[in-house]
Amino acid sequence: MSKKLTVQEMILTLQEFWSQKGCMLMQAYDTEKGAGTMSPYTFLRAIGPEPWNAAYVEPSRRPADGRYGDNPNRLYQHHQFQVVMKPAPENIQEFYLDSLRALGIEPLEHDIRFVEDNWENPSMGCAGVGWEVWLDGMEVTQFTYFQQVGGLQCSPVTSEITYGVERLASYIQDVNDVYSLEWGDGVLYGDIFKEPEYEHSKYSFEESNQDMLFDFFDKYEAEANRLMDLGLVHPAYDYILKCSHTFNLLDARGAVSVTERAAFLSRIRRMAHKVAQAFVDEREKRGFPLLNHAAKETKNV
Amino acid sequence: MSKNYLLEIGLEEMPAHVVTNSVNQLAEKTEKYLKENRISFNSIEKYSTPRRLSVIIKDIADKQEDIDLKAKGPSKKIALDADGNWTKAAIGFAKGQGLSENDIFFEELKGEEYAYIQKHETGKSSEDVLEGLTEVIKSITFPTRMHWGSFDFEYIRPIHWIVSLLDSDVVNLEILDVVSGRNTRGHRFLGKDIEIESADTYVEQLKNDFVFVDANERKQIIVDQINKIAKDNNWNVDLDKGLLEEVNNLVEYPTAFSGKFDPKYLEIPEEVLITSMKDNQRYFYARDSNGNLVPDFISVRNGNSEHLENVIRGNEKVLVARLEDADFFFKEDQKKSINDYVEKLKTVNFHVKIGTLYEKMMQVHQIASYLADEFGLSATEKTDLLRSSDIYKFDLVTNMVDEFPELQGIMGEKYANLMGENAQVAKAIREHYMPISADGDLPDSKVGSVLALSDKLDTMITFFAVDLIPSGSNDPYAIRRQAAGIVRILKENNWSLDFNELQNYLQDNLDVPASLDLNKNSKELDDFITDRVKQYLHGEKIRTDIIEAVTSNDVVDPVAMIDVAHILQNHSNDDDFKEIIESLSRIVNLAQKAEFDFNNELSVDDNYFENPSESELRNGISNIKFDEMTSEELYTQLANLKNTIQLYFDENMIMADDDNVKNNRLTQLVIADNIIAKLGDLSKIVTK
């Protein structure tokens, strides 16, 4: 590696790379979520027959992983660089390896492996088959062919590439502590995120108002269900995301017993299934507009 | 000269654990297909890497063998009209066979004459038959399958290319959008796309492009490289078979290397270090000549030795991050006491319908106490047992087990030792999970054995109490395996345990949450244990009829059943076994005819004896002190009565006209039957 990319240069490089492969550069979605997969740009768009190619950075919140800014590797909120392509290009693995080259990671100078890792998110009715990608023994990317989303079979199949931004940056910049990463222009990751990491950990483990959160969950759930009945898919989906994050906060606080845990997850799953179906139904009513777009594109080629 | 045929299926990286099995299937199914299609060949060679499944069929015939067929047509009556001319039916039949009516001849079949045609079928060319291999490729089964693109087809991973060459000619195969050819790909990074010239040059050509396609050769290279590193450093390396197989199926061009970690991490328990290296990172660990773990590891790169320093540095960094976590957990966990963890178990469910882990431990305490008395444990053993039963699940809520679930029990023992428990208590905590597989090791301490039994009994009994009974393949909590473990532990220690008594005791005494009804399904529970005993005996190669005989007993005592089964099996080759079993079975069968109230004390009245053989049998039976003897002695004593019994039946009509005589004789048979039944239902034994 000739020059060490800052985090933002890394993101810019990936954006540039994937936009040239036909991905639309979306922005992070503005509701809290545990993973880039839960952005509507992946979860909803992976459903149904319409093509979809997008790339975006997604801040992902996992309250239980918070470590008060003390642990060099674990974070309340980390960043995922998410690439979804539907249908998955035939040579998507080669695309991915080229993206590493673009980041200055020349495969011949490293050891890169595709190690089986099937991904599952039962609470969102999602399942996929794929690998974790190892770079010299470190898992830097999750590579998945979606098989099921929101309980619905995926056809055509979406490929999802999720780069762990901090992991990959630690490797590229050769630092052992995430807070020492240079985000850009000499500003360190710690300068930006150490304080919020501490505060969010403090909040999640000690200060969150459990009664309020339990109450929120019920209300968000009721609202999501009401909106789905009205066919308002996207607002409903926002409330499902809020349910999911609220549950994660309660879980981190240890407020959910094992029995209750299963019950909460099944409530979220039910909503996820319902919204997935509602989304396809709405798209179908509109005649799956992106299908026509794709047909036009093909003609032009 | 005969030819060789190459088939290579090119895929995205398959899971390491399916590669070998899949290529074996490909070879077996190909062989079956060729045999069914009458294509002869000499042998099938298998080749595989994470990205390819291949076979080479050596010395394949040019074409199918010809065959002579005799086709049957209509009966003579229908084939010829009244004038003896061929009918339309006959002409149609001949035409259908590709011949003319002049080729028809008649032959008799079951009293009627039929039209036949002798047909010679020339074999199809091997090319034509090989085109059918698409179905063979599609028929391989995998533990997981996936869709890709927009295809309505599932496979282990997307298929990208197929090489299909008969010597140097392409044989056409098509699957989805992939058409066979001679193009394959070399190593992902070191190699390039190549054209295979012929089946014979396949292995060498791939080698030139950095793919060792022969899995055995590749594995040997890895072994040699690791052994060299070990020798250079004076290490002993455990070449774990499973790990070697996995690593071999993660690479196409292996280069082994070693890396280091800071010796300070050697303070972390060895099991944790090994789990981090072996299970998480797929590294081999090494020991010095004294058997101590060294702060080094060996891994295998999928590539050559250029820039190996990057790879080593990266792997070292990853391992250190993991060990740093483990070290943190190890120190954090020791800041709390066992009591803190036990307290926490009050909030962790064992199963939603059953209760918490804490409640489970309290139940196990009571079961263990009962069993300690049953099996005659010493006072010290019992004290250790009860202490371990009060805490044995505590490690489940430690950070370390949360991070490395496979270390449950192992960390329990470590922490118990560090936190001041005695060594036996600590050991029992680890041993209570045993056996962890069908033929896994059993606990070697008595205390650990009883704790393992108590834990498994509690699981089984409580699951049955809430109707969670395994059925068919539905056994998510592996209750069958646990029950099989119970049988093995009882047998290993030769501990007799009457399940009916145990159940009665627990129904009356076990303190369980009100939602559990231990009276429920108790018959099913007996049957369930009995089935495990049957399975155990099948494993011991005991005759099926003997298994049925010994498990038909009302008393469910696994060790007793197993003992009797062995005794009967051993005697089954005796010259008089048949006679002995027949005479005893006769008693068993006739005793069924008695209609007494069995609650009464049974006695025989010699006033109703008519023949000396009656008192002889009475004396013989009453001399058997079955309470005081082993099953072997009981069998021998009953066997010795063989002639007495035969004479008894020769001389006495059981269903005599005089009711008093009849009932007296039936009573005699019932008394004898009750003793014979201690061995099982001998009437189930087949004597030929």
Image (spheres, coloured by chain):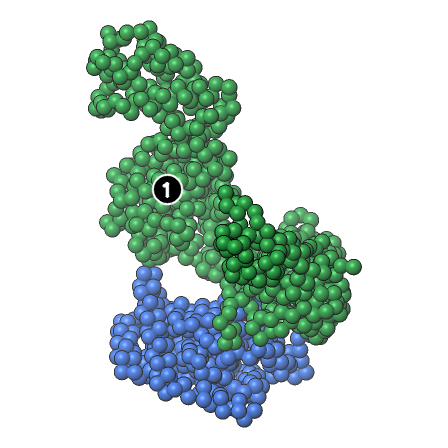
Chain colours: A blue, B green
- In the foreground, B35 or B440: B35
Residue at 52 percent across and 59 percent down: it is B87
- How packed mark 1 is, by other alpha carbons closer than 10 Å (few <14, some 14-19, many 20 or more), is some
Residue B670 seen from this side: yes
- In the foreground, B391 or B563: B563
Residue at 47 percent across and 57 percent down: it is B405
Which residue is outermost to the front?
A: B83
Left or right: B264, with B404 as reference point: right
Q: Check disc 1 and report the residue beneath it.
A: B528
Residue at 35 percent across and 85 percent down: it is A285
- In the foreground, B559 or A140: B559
Which type of secondary structure does the marked residue at label 1 adopt?
helix
- Residue B213 to residue A92: above or below: above
Where's the N terminus of chain B, which quadrant? bottom right
Three-letter amino acid code at the position of disc 1? Phe
Residue B316 seen from this side: no
- Residue B664 to residue B567: above or below: above
Please state the horizontal and vertical placement of residue B192, each as a whole percent of the image.
71, 75
Residue at 59 percent across and 66 percent down: it is B134
Chain bearing tag 1 is B
Left or right: B609, with B536 as reference point: left
Which residue is outermost to the bottom?
A: A300
Please state the horizontal and vertical placement of residue B243, each as a whole percent of the image.
61, 56
Please state the horizontal and vertical placement of residue B88, each as a whole percent of the image.
51, 61
Quadrant of the rendered image containing residue B596: top left
Please state the horizontal and vertical placement of residue B421, each as a whole percent of the image.
44, 46
